[in-house]
Structure formats: structure tokens, C-alpha cells
Image (cartoon, rainbow, N blue to C red):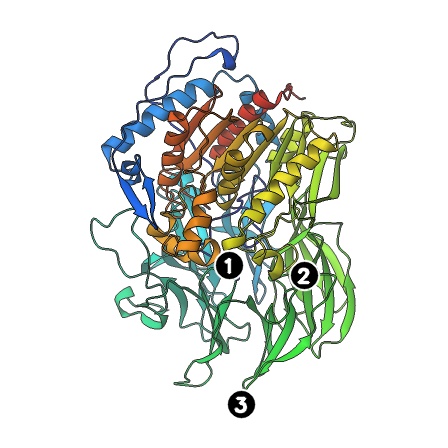
Amino acid sequence: MKFHPTGGAPCPRGGRGMSAPPSAPFWSIRAFRGAAVAVILSTFAASAAEEMHLTYPDTPRTHDVETLFGVQIADPFRWLEADPRTDTTVTEWIDAQNAVSSAYLETLPARPIFQQRLSLLNRHDTVFPPIRRGERYFFQRQGAGEDQPRLILREGTNGPERVLLDPSAQEGGGTQALAEWDVSPDGDFVAYALQKDGSDWRSIRVMDAVTGEVLDDHLEWARFTTIAWSGDGSGFYYSRFPAGEDGASFNEAVRDHAVYFHRLGTSQSEDRLVHGGASDTPLLHTATVSGDGRFLVIYSSALSGGVAVTVTNLSQDGAESLTLVESHEDQWALLGTEGTRLIFSTQMGAPQGRVMAIDLADSEPAFSELIPERPDAVLRHGTAILGDRIVLAYMVDARMVLERYRLDGTPDGSVDLPGAGTIALFQGEPGRDDGYFLFTSHKFPPTVLRLDVAENSVTPWQDPNLPVTLDGVVVEQRFYASADGTRIPVFVIRRADVTGPAPTMMTGYGGFGISMVPYYMPGAMAWVEQGGVYAVANIRGGGEYGSAWHHAGRRELKQTVFDDFIAAGEYLIAEGITALDGLAIHGLSNGGLLVAAVANQRPDLFAAVLPDVGVMDMLRFDRFTGGAMWVQEYGSPAVEDQFRTLLAYSPLHPIRDGADYPAILVTTADTDNRVVPAHSLKYAAALQVADIGAQPHLLRVTQGAGHGQGTSLATQIAQMAEQWAFAAHWTGLKVTPKD
């Protein structure tokens, strides 16, 4: 499956509606199993969780101290940075932490109720837009209750289907998942990547789509990759790191990312280096091939929100690559081609986005504007050229509309959608009038729609078959003023009969230009059906209003993100949406950083905090795996003014002794090699030794899970049931069984 990559950024949200990012496939969530080994718990009264007397595991402290720019930084829990899968001291400490948290969470009566409701609200078919090759349709489907999506081949629009790949049937069961994939131009072969235990590392294989035979081609060391077949079908492009050395550290920084070409039927040792490799600058390089097979386009990202762009004409033997964009500051994405003309969407010179074209047949190729920036809307990536039309998705106040243009840039009307929602994963190509995309909203599960650009008609290609009705749920978009007066949108979701203050779960992200757009969230619905309110704050640092919105919340301006989120909580209380002691917050990855940071800054504002796989040590994040690439977003701890900004909000460092902190449940996973578990382990240890009140400050670590795709549905549900039960207890949400 092709996508415009932002790989390597901390993942905002994941999953099959449970929680997910729009810039990455939003069905892929991580969740956790959490194992309890021994109960390290003193006496407690069985009647209620708050009567438990928690005894946390002993956490040894070391004397690690660094002096940075005249500031002494104590790091007494640095030993927790060791690989949690192999270091026995860390493993035993995690087991002890899981024992405490398991015993506590088992006392919460809401947990089995949430588990049952989440299972039902997730019990729908999820089908992803097909790649069409002739009359063959290749797509993923995750049936109701299935742990992982399967790869399906359908012969004809409504013809017979057969399963090409069921990752749950592979070695590893529910922890083995299908990641990136693409189909050869003739439809005879599928190259696909498998991931295990949620790791970012991929193993790539090739299948004969006609016979189902898995070929001998076997590629390793792929990570942050796309898969893109060449136009002649002789092989495909993919991205990888150099082969790792035996005994390499789990936390070791990754560098020298590169695009390679693999010729079908050869060994990986013969793969040809195409772009990237050894470099002093940490970059990610990913490839795509134009729909006509003529052009190879490589994006090089420093994770600053933008990419450099290089193109090669594959139809010319020995053609040299041409750098079209050198800077990494702006977003670019190929929409399609018309002969030798390449058409891109970009934010270069247009923070809201515009469409540019370049003709490589010109003696001195240069970009020219095809469709100008709209002042009232943000152009989104992921749309395409279909037939003889350009189809563009625009975002207006975090909701999308779909517009048509002719190839000369002339407006050609709008496309009617089922309602206010989100468009994702557009599949289609020039010369074909049919395209396929996902549509979803807060109340509308992901549904594949077919667009015929010749008739300008949209029809369902596959319905989700949700077994419950959501007619009683109301979604309202409001706006509030942040600390500096900036107008910020927030979605408020609740039952129609809930009109007074109610326990509220609020989430946000605020980073990497990633937008919190409407999408179906079983977790939100499970909270709302119990009489609670679910709120989504579209804070700065995201891309809801273009690159300017992103840049207003990164590097030295990161405090703006926290101010926006705190202001959202204050607004919900002031407006009577939630009570003063009824606000819970949760966030994943960069969102985990968000909720942990505001817990330090305003512990009085929140009743419960759920930081998940968060970036917690802002003084050492750049030393682990791909963290060096986040410097473009956060700033560098090695630069004095940036160091002082990072120190001021780093969740691990300004924990406030003497303050009364909310209840906190920290979650991570031992195979997370995106945001390594050391962040959460050190943060939880610091919370537990601090004088911050009597509320529980617990740690849950899932073994055999990672940061993003690949977690089984059952595991996702189990973790969210624990998180929601924890938050319900501390916000006062009354949870009862439903029919």
C-alpha cells in the first residue's frame, strides 16, 4: 500500500478507531497486554480502589549527574535505559511494577464493562481502499473481532475473493502483522512487509498472486519504508538501514537510511543503492513510482514537517536523478503525472497548501502554480489525479471537503460526501475514472467509497456493518481562546440527553504537523455511552490550519501547545461541560509528552492522566533509535537556548514536590523502538519517589508490543478497558452494563 511518508515521528494515535493519526494508516493502534508476575502490594480494603495502600517497588538510584550549560542534571534512573527484554534487572523491575498495577486495576469494577462494550463497538468489518490492477482488486479486510487485517484478492468488482495473506496464521499469531505492501503493474506479484511484536523493523517477502506461492526473495533491515514496484515489474523500491551488528543495543541510534532497488528473484546482497546512505544529517528516504510507471520520486525527510524531492525518469536508460526540491522545510506530495508533467501538492510559499506542476521535458524545468492556495481551507495530502481530473481534499476547521479540478487547474465542482468527516488513503490513477478512499467521522466507522469522476458520483464499495446504533450521540464543534487569544477548535462528543457537567476525557497531539481530524473511535463511544463527554482539542503544533499552525507550536514555541491544551480544559470547566474534578486527559507518543507536561504545569486541573508511549526525557530523546530526527521538531539539548526550553517542559524533570498531582497511569511496551520504553520507565520511577500526593501513579508495560501497527485487537481492547476504568474511577463516571 502506498502512502506519503512521515515515518519516524512519534505516532499520534493509532488504530482501528481506537485511537489514530491521519498521516499514517489510522487503523493501526498499539495496545498492550501487561503481565503480572508477583503481587507487591500491602494490605488493602477490598471494597474500593482508593482504600488500597499502594507500595511501589523499590527503585535503586544511581549518582549519574551531568552539567549542561552550567545546570546540574541528576539522572538517578538512567539504568532503566537498558534493553527491557534482555536486561534482567530492568525486567524484574518491570515485572514488579506490572504486579502492582495489575492488582490495582483488577479492583476497578468498570474494567470488565468497558472491555465488553469496546469489544462490541469494535465489532465491525474494516475494509481498506483497493489497489486495482486490471480487473483484480487487492485490499485489506479486518473482519469483526479479528485480530489483524488480512490481504484479499477479488476477481472483478463483485467477483469471488480469496485470502492471499493472513498474518494471524503466520508464526507469531496475533503479534505478526501485515505492514506496507504494493502490487506489481501486471497484478501477478505482491511485495509485502511483515512486522513482529509491533516493532518498526520489517521483513519483506514476495508472493505470486496467481498461485499464492511465497517466493525466495527475503529482505531484512527495512524500517520507515514504502514499497513501490518499478513500471516494468522487474522489481521494487524499498527503504532500509545498514545491516545491524550482532549484539547491537535496542536503544542504538539509527542512521544512514537509504532507498534500494530489489530485482525479483535475486538475493538482498545484490540490491542496488538508489538514494541516501551514509550522512551526517539524519534523514529518512522513501520512494514512490508514478501511476504510469515512468517516474521514480524519492522524498527525503528530516521530520521537520517537510521533504526534499528527487525524481528519476525510469523510461530512459541511465537517466540521472534530478533534485526538484532541496529544502526539508515544506510538504510535497506527488498527485500524479500527465506525460512529462509532474503535479504536486505543496506548502512551499503557501502555508495552507497549493498545487504546482513541473514539466521535465523543458530545457530548464521549473515549478509553476496550477491551483492557488485557498485562504479558507488547508490542502491535505492523500488525494490524486483520477481520469482527467485532479481531486483534492481540503480541510476547513478540521473537517474535510472534496473538490474537483481539470488538469489545467480550472475548478470543476465539489464531490458530495456522506457528512462532515475525514478522507484518507485515496487509491486511483490517471486514465481511470474510478478511485477509492476511506471516509470516517466521529460517528461513522471507516467505510470505503468509490468515486467515479466522469459521473461525479460517490457510492459505498463496502459498508462496515456496525452492530450498534449511534443515533443518540451528538458531535459539536466549539471554539475557545488560548492564553494568547488565539481561536482554537475543540470537538465535544456526548449523548444528546447529557446537558450538564459530566466526567470528560480530553485528548490532543500538538506536534509534527499532524492533525486531529474526525474519525470513528470506539473508545470515545464507549466513554460517551456511559454519560461521559469526549473532547478533541485541535491545538497548535498540528496541521489543522496549515504549516503556520504547526510552526506556532514547535521548537522554542512548544509551550504554546501546552497553553492551548490547558486552555481547552479550562474552557470545558467554565462552560459547564465538565466539573472541576471531572477532567481526564490521554495522549499517545507526542500526545503522551503533552499530557505529562501539562500534568506538571497544572496538576490542579486534572483528575486523571493517561500518558501512553510518551516522549518523557527531553534532554536525552535524541540519543535513542530515531530520536535524533526529532530535533527538527523539538530542538536540540546540545544547543543552550533550546536546552533551556526543553528542560522547562520535559515531563521527567520539573515534577513538583509538594504539589497534589492527579492519578496517573503510565503505559508503554517493551518492544517499542520508536519511543523507547526508557522514557516511560524513568518518568514513572520519578513520579513514584516524588512527594506529589496520595493518588496512584502506576506503570503498565506490555511485553511483546511496540509503538504502532501490529497489536492484536484483543490486546488493544484490554488496555483501553484498563485506562478507561482508571479514568472513570477518578473522574466519578458511573459505569453500568449495557444491553
Front disc: 1 or 3? 3
Q: Nearer the viewer, residue 454 or 302?
A: 302
- Residue 285 in the image: state x and y as whole percent: 42, 66
Q: Nearer the viewer, residue 278 or 433?
A: 278
Q: Secondary structure at mark 2?
A: strand
Going by the numbered disc 3, the residue's amino acid type is: Glu
State the CA–CA distance, disc 1 to disc 3.
34 Å
Q: Residue at x 25, y 38 (%)?
A: 86
State the CA–CA distance, disc 2 to disc 1.
25 Å
Front disc: 2 or 1? 2
* Mark 2 vs 1, N-terminal side: 1
Q: Which residue is mark 2?
A: 378
Task: Describe residue 697's horizontal placement relative to residue 205 as left or right.
Answer: right
Is any atom of residue 375 visible in this view? yes
Is any atom of residue 313 visible in this view? no
- Residue 44 in the image: state x and y as whole percent: 44, 9
Going by the numbered disc 2, the residue's amino acid type is: Val
Residue 549 placement: quadrant: bottom right
Q: Which residue is mark 1?
A: 1
Circles 1, 3 touching at the beta carbon (< 8 Å): no
